[in-house]
């Protein structure tokens, strides 16, 4: 047995679980609305609990004798599920549809969110209840991984976009499967689990996921939300720049030279007197504000005196 590899697998799986949860709150805040962060948290708790109960109900099926194989299998399945469910999720538009279709789409979305957390619950439950190592130590590694995942999510979202972050989480999970495969706890089960043959190529799956995550953020043709706040996003009207971070998705679009737009203009404001080049800054697909080009000449920004929002 190689305890270090087992603990490494637990650490990576629990870290990826928290990263996925946080990244999903960001994606749903962009695609739908901010309060759906609570939906992600609720579904995560539901999925993890369901996975744990599933293991309990099949307590005779899993044991230390096949632990490394079981952990490797379900962790690899988890990695693939994170990537596939994340990709399907970007095609769904729960906001803009008729009632019957909307109910079905919400069911699809809930399923895409739940499945990875269900499998995460299965893996963590097996690691805690079937390993030969002290449960306190295993749980300590579990908590350390979750804490690292919280910080890792912030780093991912500042380095790449939301869908690419999901792919990176799936790659990290696949790395956890590789660690479990080398832990050497028990042998293979007598009966083969579904999809066991393709899932045995763990290193190939890991490389594919890493390449997919790296390439997705470097092209405008990758996986990204199809509908944002009920509006179809096409490449035809793509903004000049789109950038994600840990608390927003910012996009900038050039709207050319036009009269300066003000939020609360004075009755004496003559917009035709103040043409200026502007860009529209859009936050999370809905909230917007204008950015004005300034050449260093204070007089050219004189229109700001006419806006009541600048009074302070």
Image (cartoon, grey):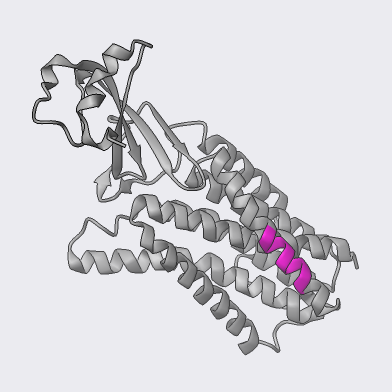
Point out the image quarter for the N terminus. Answer: bottom right
Q: Position of residue 69 (x, y in %)?
A: 76, 69
In this picture, is 85 found above or below 265?
A: below
Point out the image quarter for the C terminus. Answer: top left
The part of the image, by quadrant, that contains residue 18 is bottom right
- Give the main secondary structure of the magenta stretch: helix
Residue 223 or 261: which is nearer the viewer? 261
The part of the image, by quadrant, that contains residue 293 is top left
Q: Is 158 within the magenta? A: no
Q: Residue 192: in sight, yes or no?
A: no
Q: Which residues are magenta?
A: 139-147
Q: Residue 214: in sight, yes or no?
A: yes
Residue at the spot x=37%, y=34% of the render?
A: 251
The part of the image, by quadrant, that contains residue 34 is bottom left
Instruction: Pick out the residue farthest to the left.
Output: 267
Instruction: Pick out the residue farthest to the front.
Output: 312
Residue 47 appears left or right of 283: right
Residue at the spot x=84%, y=74% of the render?
A: 186
């Amino acid at each position: 047995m190689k305890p270090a590899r087992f603990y490494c697998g637990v650490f990576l799986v629990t870290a990826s679980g928290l990263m996925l949860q946080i990244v999903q709150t960001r994606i749903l805040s962009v695609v739908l609305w901010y309060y759906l962060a609570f939906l992600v948290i609720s579904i995560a708790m539901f999925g993890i609990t369901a996975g744990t109960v599933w293991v309990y109900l099949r307590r005779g099926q899993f044991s230390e004798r096949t632990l490394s194989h079981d952990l490797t299998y379900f962790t690899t399945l988890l990695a693939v599920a994170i990537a596939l469910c994340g990709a399907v999720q970007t095609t769904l538009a729960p906001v803009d549809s008729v009632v019957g279709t909307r109910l079905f789409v919400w069911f699809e979305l809930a399923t895409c969110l739940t499945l990875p957390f269900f499998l995460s619950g299965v893996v963590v439950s097996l690691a805690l209840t079937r390993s030969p190592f002290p449960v306190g130590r295993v749980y300590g590694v579990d908590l350390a991984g979750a804490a690292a995942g919280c910080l890792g999510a912030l780093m991912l979202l500042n380095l790449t976009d939301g869908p690419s972050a999901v792919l990176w989480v799936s790659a990290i999970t696949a790395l956890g499967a590789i660690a479990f495969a080398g832990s050497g706890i028990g042998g293979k089960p007598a009966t083969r689990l579904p999809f066991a043959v393709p899932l045995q190529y763990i290193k190939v799956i890991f490389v594919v996921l890493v390449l997919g995550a790296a390439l997705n953020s470097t092209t405008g043709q990758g996986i990204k939300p199809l509908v944002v706040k009920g509006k179809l996003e096409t490449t035809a009207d793509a903004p000049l720049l789109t950038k994600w971070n840990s608390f927003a998705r910012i996009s900038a679009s050039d709207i050319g030279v036009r009269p300066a737009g003000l939020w609360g203009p004075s009755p004496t404001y003559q917009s035709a007197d103040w043409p200026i080049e502007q860009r529209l800054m859009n936050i999370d697909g809905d909230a917007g504000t204008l950015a004005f080009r300034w050449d260093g000449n204070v007089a050219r920004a004189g229109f700001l005196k006419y806006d009541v929002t600048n009074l302070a």
